[in-house]
Image (spheres, grey):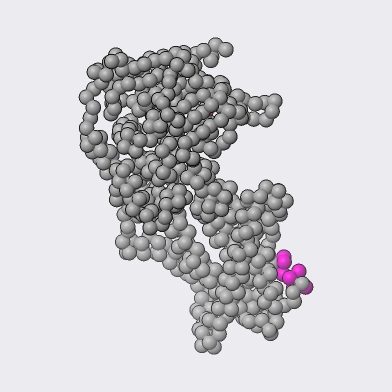
Amino acid sequence: MPAVTTEADTSAVDAPAGAPAVRIAHVHKSFGRPGARTHVLDDITLDVAPGEFVTLLGASGCGKSTLLNLVAGLDRPSAGTIEVAGGRPALMFQEHALFPWLTAGRNIELALRLAGVPRPERRAEAERLLELVRLGGSYGKRVHELSGGMRQRVAMARALAQGSKVLLMDEPFAALDAITRDVLHDEITRIWAERQLSVLFVTHNVREAVRLAQRVVLLSSRPGRVARQWLIDLPQPRRIESSGVADLSIEITEELRGEIRRHVQH
Amino acid sequence: MSSTDTAPARTGGDSADVGAGLDALDAVSAQRSSLGEVLRTKALPPLIGVVVVLALWQGAYSLHLTSSYKLPSPLDVWHSLQDLWYQGTLFSIIWTSVWRGLSGFLLAVAIGTPIGLVVARVRPVRTAIGPVLQGLQSLPSVAWVPAAVIWLGINDSMMYAVILLGAVPSIANGLVAGIDQVPPLFLRAGRTIGATGLAGARHVLIPAALPGYLAGLKQGWAFSWRSLMAAELVASSPDLGRGLGRFLEDQREFSDMSGVLLGIILILFVGIAIELLVFTPIERRVLRNRGLLAATR
Ligand SMILES: Nc1ncnc2c1ncn2[C@@H]1O[C@H](COP(=O)(O)OP(=O)(O)OP(=O)(O)O)[C@@H](O)[C@H]1O
Ligand SMILES: [Mg+2]
């Protein structure tokens, strides 16, 4: 069985059957005043199937965060439609974005409260979510008392507290050291499988994209388009240093370089 | 390539152990310093400062740098304090001023907070009165006293008017600055977890703006106290309770220099005491909770 399927023609990659968890259809996004507009996203069409793990890969400034913000509802597309099954998706930022005036547990409880969880259940649910990210006993910790990796895990617990089956992640591990990131890759893979989440994960780290995803989507730059997709068939849990991940990473990196070079020649 | 050339998958336990090890390495352990250390590092330096000032003062007095009616000795001032104590008026004088100052300050908070919120969040209002509000901060509130006397007469309302004119702008400006400094990331994070509109203001905007707001409140208190002393100094009427400013002016009329110095010291003392007893603990607590205060060691 081949471990990897690559498809040069994006439309040839069929999403699994059933209504998608995220449907991005012909989305355009421009910034700036009329006359001096920069076209950042150009006709992006992309579905994430329920339970699918998709990583979005692209050079810096190609519009990955812009796309994620659109899906999260923090901004509106200039044209096109975005549908997310089950309402507002959860979003994790590159920075943990935890509120420093609340303890770790209280940060999670605030998300539970805003999601409509009744007060008597919140405390127990927050403790349960902390257990899930292996931070049981950290309920009363202040944000500044946690390490970078612990903060991202609390942020993950807070995102899960929203109760959405769709999780958007914008380079959530980019600021972490390699070993911590490795541990968190295992964590997110485990939680994704346990909770059957649909994940759209942005990164510019090719190996990370291959380590995590069932499908890697490469965006081109200026304007951002879906350049190519890879279905990844390696069994989970994978190791980022394994040869399967490495081989495919080399191939995708070559493609990414080509994308960037093509841009320079213009 | 095929799936067989992936390295054997690690067990979950291995990764969890690595994670736990990292957590243990990274965890911050807060150390509390002992009482003796706190006294030595926090209380001793100001005490030494006071002793040095007293020594210089006593030295200047002993050397007869100027006539003793212009510069009484520390002991003379101490005797003035004792006199006030035995007359039984010391606390009523202090209390009259403190009561006016604190109630005027609370009124200023009640008025300045909504003004600050509106100026920070409503753009046209900000363009219209934002600069005026900032300018008012640099206007010494004693400048308002003559106007307040003409408008309101010499009574308590006039005192409160002067306090408000002095303190409201700094409280409002503090809140505006606090809101301006809220990192946009917090607002976006709040929106993604559903904190929009009023819930957003309550759960994200206001707590995030708290440090700036507290700084404004602290300055607001300093301005309230200053404004009140100016008003008490200028406004004299038998109907008015006798506060510290009035006491100071009375001593001047009696040409009692040690009484004047006592008045100045009491005004300074009360202002500092309220700041240390009320504002500093609140501010320290807020900053410490957010990790914005270096741990005391
Ligand atoms: N609010 C905005 N106004 C104007 N231009 C913007 C705005 N937001 C993003 N852009 C532009 O859109 C482009 C894409 O930005 P975006 O942050 O989405 O990139 P990215 O792919 O996430 O990059 P990185 O990997 O560095 O995070 C950039 O050129 C940026 O300058
Ligand atoms: Mg980005």
Task: Indicate the quadrant containing the N terminus of chain A: top left, top right, bottom left or bottom right.
Answer: top left
Q: Is residue B252 above or below residue A71?
A: below
At 52% from the left and 42% from the top, the residue drawn is B188
Q: Is residue B270 above or below residue A239?
A: below
Relative depth, front residue between A154 and B234: A154
Q: Position of residue B221 (x, y in %)?
A: 57, 65
Relative depth, front residue between B185 and B53: B185
Q: Is residue B149 magenta?
A: yes
Q: Position of residue B181 (x, y in %)?
A: 55, 47
Instruction: Report the predominant secondary structure element of the magenta stretch.
Output: helix
Relative depth, front residue between A186 and B133: A186
Q: Which residues are magenta?
A: B143-150
At 22% from the left and 24% from the top, the residue drawn is B8
Looking at this view, name the residue that lies furthest to the right: B150
Q: Position of residue A19 (x, y in %)?
A: 45, 30
Whether residue A47 appears in this view of the structure is: yes
Whether residue B63 appears in this view of the structure is: no
At 67% from the left and 26% from the top, the residue drawn is A36
